[in-house]
Amino acid sequence: MQAEAAPSPVLLAVEGVTKHFAGVTALSDVSLDVRPGEILGLLGENGAGKSTLLKILSGVMPPSGGRITFDGAEYTPSNPQDAKRLGIVTIYQELSLIPTLTVAENIFIGRAPTGPLGLVSWRRMEEDSRAITARVGLAIDPMTPVSALSVAEQQLVEIARALSLKSRLIIMDEPTSALTETEVQRLLSIMDRLRKDNVAIMFVTHRLEEASAICDRMTVLRDGRLAGHLDRQGGPIKLPAIIEKMVGRAASELYARPAQRAVAGDVVLSVRGLRTVRDPEAPHAIVLDGVDLDLKAGEILGVAGLVGSGRTELARAIFGADRIAAGTITLDGKPIAPASPADAIKLGIGLVPEDRKHQAIFAALGILVNFSVASLGRFSNGFGFMAERRERDALSGFRKMLSIRMASAEQAIEGLSGGNQQKVILARWLARDPKVLVVDEPTRGVDVGAKAEVHQILVQLAARGIAVMMISSELPEVLAVSDRIVTMRRGRITGEMPGVEASEERLMELMALDRQDGREQEGQAR
Amino acid sequence: MSIADEQSQRGGATLAKLLMSFGPLLFLAALVVVFTVLKPSFIDPINLFNITRQISITGLIALGMTFVILTAGIDLSVGSLLAFCGMVAAVVAKGGAANTLSLSTSGTQGYGWFAALLAATVVGAAAGGVQGLAITRLKVPPFVVTLGGLTVFRGLTLTISNGGPISGFDASMRWFGTGLIGPVPVPAIIFAIAAILCHIVLRYTRYGRAVYAVGGNAEAARLSGLRVDRILVSVYVIVGFFAGLAAFVLSARLNSSEAVAGIGYELTVISAVVIGGTSLFGGIGSVGGTVVGAALIGVLQNGLQFNNVSSYTQSIVIGLILILAVAFDRWLKSRVRR
């Protein structure tokens, strides 16, 4: 940590930066600074202006006003290459590695070390790569193709590449969103090591716990403006302080446990001995290993599990999206065997999938089309013509009920914020009056304010008698809305308890019970 | 972003959005103006109806191709399939594959125009269905399956016709290619009716919604309960049907089914769809756009011919216009996104 007496000189200084797009102000008078050897957290809800600021810093676009200096000199990159050359590297959520090339080739792409004849010196490239990957704690053969690495490892390769470019400021955009808990810890410790090597890091994240654990200082944006700076004073920056800056209201309003509801319900969905087999096309997918589960009408069942616990696979198996090898599923007492999502949907099951962009939304299509796609039969007449009036009325009903903020039914859904997109997807299923609704990571990529709204919606649905199964890796979320909680680990259910009796510690223990031996097996497999 | 911000952003983009929906149409209007200035007789109704007759063959196939491209697919076999269906129509119309070369009269052994039309469209639809099944069941990409189809159907055509044309149909069949209703050529009327039907299907039916959804995001469509494979097969059936219909009209117009008919048509057809603003990545596009795209190519060909530009030069110009039209479209869209 920096000594208070001699703060190191500022490396990057952003002063009063503003950005307008076609009459909209995306950033207004934002200032921040980053010093060598520190980690600055950049936080804010979706739409707060983080991405715009990142794009400016990484040279994707120029600011409309304000001044940026890097290492004392005016910083005006005209493209991302400029930014890299000057020593600022941005690592985006969507990694930019080329999967078919090796780790070494990716690190040295465009600047491979050459031998006497001007040919690529593979040996030097391998040796140099080994040295650099070691710095980020990555112990793999540099000649491995990147496609064989996990997302976490690929991220480390990107960081290694940034280091090999002698970067002095590394900007990481949501680096932990696709990582498991163990991988997150590893990344944080590597960030800490880089900090000691005097590298400056700007850490953009949604995950407040991680930010609090690692950041020296934080800059919080809200609605394109600076909401404030937070400083580590003796201990980590406290979450409520961050949340208050982000949303402009007290944290106690979020994650407030709803009053314990009288959970009525008969068992609607019952799963016994559910097993899946390894799909040769997706060898990394988790195999369900005998799952027993009951879901009652009007309850919210929280399914807590880490990435790789089989939680998503459970949802997909129930929904008919993956093949089942053994076991039974009964719905209202009758055995069912959905062979496709279409079958499951007809039976009254809905799924809000985990990866909204790739599995749920039709990005370029209008909100109306996105809304009604699962209910085309209900919104059309006997001749197959759409009953558009009925369809629009239904959408506007849900728009009010779920307070979806949108301009028109024709607006492309990609123009909505993550939270509003998710509400449209929820409306898609509500239009079918499902008996069972499975929601997988319902608030992923949803900003803090809208999260509470999504939770409220889930509670309302359960109150209407729908059996809701909510899968989530965010424990505060599981605790906040679940009437009952089961934990999963390696394709099995490892525990069950009423929501009121659960705590983060207990759940975490059940989710990660034998993580140690799990990791060993993984190591052997590799 | 607040609602007010979003609204002001929309305001700023309205002009560009308007241009975007009418971009190809503006391009078409500009071409008509240019050709009229160069040679005023271009705008003569006789010439304009001539153009509609010229575009109706590839236009019909382009309507079917719009469905295919909306699902992010492609069909390269349509030119060969057209020739094959034309040959089927000829065999049925004349009651055999022998090329008598005689203009048939009431005494021929054939089965008449209706049977010929039915045969051509059913065979076309079935051929499309087979390709669709190969795409969905064997999981071979559409590009490869239909590239294979391009060769197979040409080979079949040459086999049944023994390489030569089959000519000479009766007047009732020829009417579909050469007839007029008032001043309007019959092929143009067939094209117009087909275009309106396709527009209605894509815009107002449940099936149309499903086509857009599958093209927009096949995985999301599957997880929303759509039978993605069935929809994919169906679009190849549709384009096959239109290849058959176009084959019938072409044979009727030429009074002959040629084994070498339709070579390179797939490129004209795909150009028309793409110029009309349908995205090769699926999910975006419209029948209206395709009609404009087909008209644009027709006007260009006719206008160049009218000004005595050689057919060699015509290909160069049309190729460049294809690239320019799409570049213009991309540019407009990038302006809207900002």
Image: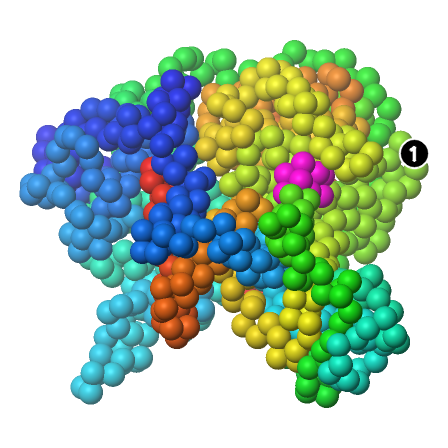
Badge 1 element: loop
Mark 1 Cα-neighbour bin, 10 Å: few <14, some 14–19, many ≥20: few
Residue that appears at 65% across and 54% down: B180
Q: Is residue A22 above or below residue B298?
A: above
Does residue B207 belong to the magenta stretch?
Answer: yes
Furthest toward the right, the residue is: A334
Where does the magenta region start and end?
B199-211
- Mark yes or no: residue B259 visible: yes
Q: Is residue A426 above or below residue A178?
A: above
User: Picture coordinates of residue A63 (x, y %)?
Assistant: 20, 35
Dominant secondary-structure state across the stretch colored magenta:
helix
Of residue B321 and residue A11, the one placed in the foreground of this image is B321
Residue that appears at 67% across and 27% down: A388
Quarter holding the C terminus of chain A is bottom right
Residue that appears at 36% across and 69% down: B309
Give the labeled residue for mark 1. Answer: A333
Of residue B282 and residue A164, the one placed in the foreground of this image is B282
Quarter holding the N terminus of chain A is top left
